[in-house]
Amino acid sequence: MIRKILFFLLTLIINKIYSQKINQEYKIRPKKINEKIKIDGKINENVWKEADVAKNFFMITPTDGKKAQQESEVRILYDEKYIYFGIVFFNNSIQGNYAVESLRRDFSFNKNDNLLIAIDPFNNQTTGFTFGLNAYGAQWDGTMYDGGRVDLNWDTKWVSEVTFDKDKWICEISIPLKSIRYKEGVNEWGINFGRLDLKANEKSSWAPVPRQFPSVSLAYTGVLVWDEPPPKQSKNISVIPYYLLNNNQDKKSTNKIGGDFKMNFSSSLNLDLTINPDFSQVEVDQQITDLDRFELFYPEKRQFFLENADLFANFGYKTIRPFFSRRIGLGVPIEGGLRLSGNIDEKWRIGLMNIQTQSLNKMNLPKQNFGVLSIQKKVFDRSSIGLMFINKNSLINSIKNESDYSKYNRSLGIEYNYASNDNLWQGKILVLKTFTDNLDNTKNSSLASHLEYNSKNWKWRIQQDYIGENFNAEVGYVPRKGFFKLSSIIGYLFYKENSKIISHGPKFSRTLFTDKNYKKTDLIDELSYFLNFDDRSSFNIGFASNYIKLLDDFDPIKSNIKSLLKGSLHKWNSISLEYLSNQQKKFTYKLEGIMGGYYQNGKRRGLGAELGYRFQPYISLNSLLLYNSIDLESPWNKNNFWLIGTKVDITLTNKIFFSNLYQYNEQFDLWNFNSRFQWRYSPASDFFLVFNSNEVLIPKELKSWNINFKINYWLDFN
């Protein structure tokens, strides 16, 4: 089977032919101006009347290919420093109240009437930038990768205003050209504009996009045609110093000073340097009930690791990541780091990172250096070849127990990412190898590949993974090794018009794990049926069959009472339900449940609810309630676990945010409270006041709290 997959992928590579950009005929020409534009959400300057207009949007959902019911118009102007957008969204078909979540930056797409702009400056249909606004003016920006995925952790300076009445809402935007990485001398960019109108239950775009893809899919952008190329950018330099004052439960106050330095080597390649960084303003992780045999994944939230993160974090697969930045500096101070990242030209991208951490003698942690090199080259229309090298060095002669650490750990990998011109076909081939000074460097390889097809009706995927028993990616996230894996998914959607149900259909998946001798250790079959309604609510029901042969001793409830023995065999079935409500309503909810067997002939029942209510746009209330009841034989007996999380998000303006998160995890008797006040007093410059409190009673009592005052300021030198 592995040979067949590889053969098919190679056939796609060999037979790949170049073809014309899909929406090449959709063109808009920005007008160059010399007068000043006032960003007030009115677009009433006379020069706007002379601009080219993008209109006649196409519906994406509930039915693609038709003209949108709600009319939209987009105009573009530019000068030597800025590109300006003037957008009018008319309510000509359906009027009503606008739906917005809050005024917080980077809002949730599905919960807001919104505008999205996708910009592809290199016209490579794989990478770019996206900007957006909701109907009350909250901003949304991010970098784009893999042709349609968005990283919202990227922030840049830009100005916008929104005005609205019952007939329309108007967006006026000014984006500095230096905020967008682009190659000098290029006359055409890829561009598209998307609109989500929840009162009409309609998603639309200027250049048409098939319903199975996001509205910002770069394979389906139109063309922005410059009458003359955008001006050459100067070497922009930014310095962002910060000051931190911390106080904790020991009544100890500490002061900390550090900062970031940014410089553009070119309009598309930038250098970031951080000295004595601090991440105290980052929100805490959301708690979960842990019933898994393997390490759980928590996403990176620290700003330094997030810009151009796809070059580093998205190499490999979800459970085969050679680089996982949370291995660096959590619990250990970082002295400094640098990152060079961006586009060299329309075909080459590079990411270079080096981080130095301090040693902690009390915890027997040595000083460590982490170096990462990632190179990506575009091939064919929308495919790429990537190379990654990771080097971790530990100065173990500075600690007592030198045998606890390896002097070095290295990973080397190459991958080929395939994407067809129409985005229907995608695939990957990945090869990785690790090297560690004190381990046997045989059976230290990983090989994985997949192929998937995603049309309006059919979706299927087949993937194979192999990880050797000595594969050791110390800076990565590889929770399981020493196995072969084969997984497959197939699903079909039926579409209906003029019906409350707009689509429905089944999906079946199978996941098989074997050991190095090809003997079955895990087999999971899942059959589900999905219903998608015209108000954007959804319902699905699923059935799962589990076969697991334990590879190690395992405590099924993480209670430290007793463990199931390595090699023991466990089989059970379960049924699950999930319903997601209409997101246009001020009160929203998600309900889920599971019932069935568990390890050791046990029984499991679980209920979950995510509840939300908004007093738009100023207050958003959200709660998470999860309940698990697990009934096992003695000595575990019956165990009930509650997980409760409540978040109050207050957005007084689109520059002042106050969030409070309270969590309780009964499984570990863990209480956590996080309160964060943020004032963006100047573009990209913030004042933070953050309070954290933790109380853990299992396995031993631990109480801690701290309060942080932090201020930073973004200084530009052009």
Image (cartoon, rainbow, N blue to C red):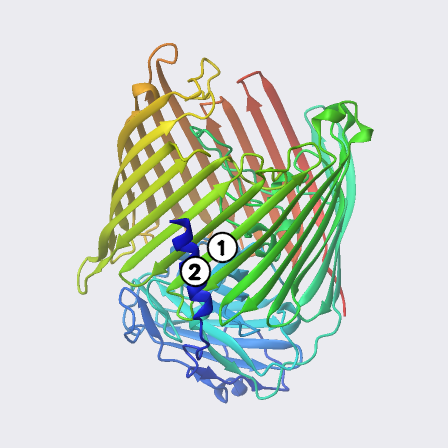
Q: Is residue 140 above or below residue 708?
A: below
Estimate the x, y position of residue 561 in percent, counting from the top left.
Answer: 46, 13
- Residue type at mark 2 is Leu
Report the quarter where the C terminus lies. bottom right
Query: Helix or strand or loop: what does disc 2 sit on?
Result: helix
Q: Quadrant of residue 17?
A: bottom left
Q: In the rendered view, does 675 fall on the left or right side of 194?
A: right
Q: Which mark is residue 429?
A: 1
Identify the secondary structure beneath mark 1: strand
User: Residue 305 location in percent, x, y?
Assistant: 64, 50
Q: Which mark is residue 138?
A: none
Kindly indicate whether the residue at mark 1 contacts the one at mark 2 (C-beta within 8 angstroms): yes
Q: Nearer the viewer, residue 531 or 194?
A: 531
Q: In terms of depth relative to the viewer, which is nearer, 430 or 292?
A: 430
**Residue 9, numbered label:** 2
How many numbered circles does the render carry?
2
